Amino acid sequence: MTVHDSTALSTTARLLQDRITTALVPTVLEIEDESHLHKGHLHGAKLQEAQGGGHFSVTIVSAKFEGLPLVQRHRVVYTAVGDLMGGKVHALSMKTLTPEESEQLSL
């Protein structure tokens, strides 16, 4: 698994990693903290300062996505991260793939 985070590995990125890993047993997990890209936005820096809500992008490759349409894959991820959404995580961009899809894309 790979975690990309501009501040080494932030507490929130670590929580995302733990929850996603436990629920989805991914073969690939990439987490990128993109909060710094949103500092000028109303919900960027101000929200992050007030509540710790950051913007993250994740790429997840998991066999648990087999047979699931995109919307259900995202629901599975939102269920896994649970209460982090709306608190420590303000926005979560997702790329969710099965191992076969990942192989076809050479990830």
Image (tube, rainbow, N blue to C red):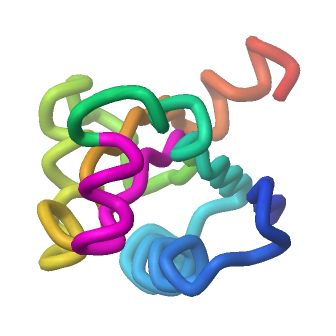
Residue 47 located left or right of residue 75: right
The image shows residue 14, relative to residue 99, as above or below, that is below
Question: Where is the N terminus found, in terms of image quarters?
Answer: bottom right
Name the one closer to the observer, 70 or 33. Answer: 33
The residue that appears at 37% across and 77% down in the rendered structure is: 23
The residue that appears at 40% across and 56% down in the rendered structure is: 54
Please provide the residue range marked out in magenta.
Answer: 44-58
| Residue 83, visible in the rendered structure | yes
Within the magenta stretch, is there residue 85? no
Corner quadrant of residue 105? top right
The image shows residue 96, relative to residue 16, as above or below, that is above
Name the one closer to the observer, 97 or 11. Answer: 11
Name the one closer to the observer, 84 or 68. Answer: 84
The residue that appears at 23% across and 41% down in the rendered structure is: 43
**Residue at the farthest top position:** 105
Residue 36 in percent (x, y) is at 60, 42
| Residue 81, visible in the rendered structure | no
Name the one closer to the observer, 59 or 25. Answer: 59
Question: Where is the C terminus found, in terms of image quarters?
Answer: top right
Residue 106 in percent (x, y) is at 86, 20
Within the magenta stretch, is there residue 55? yes
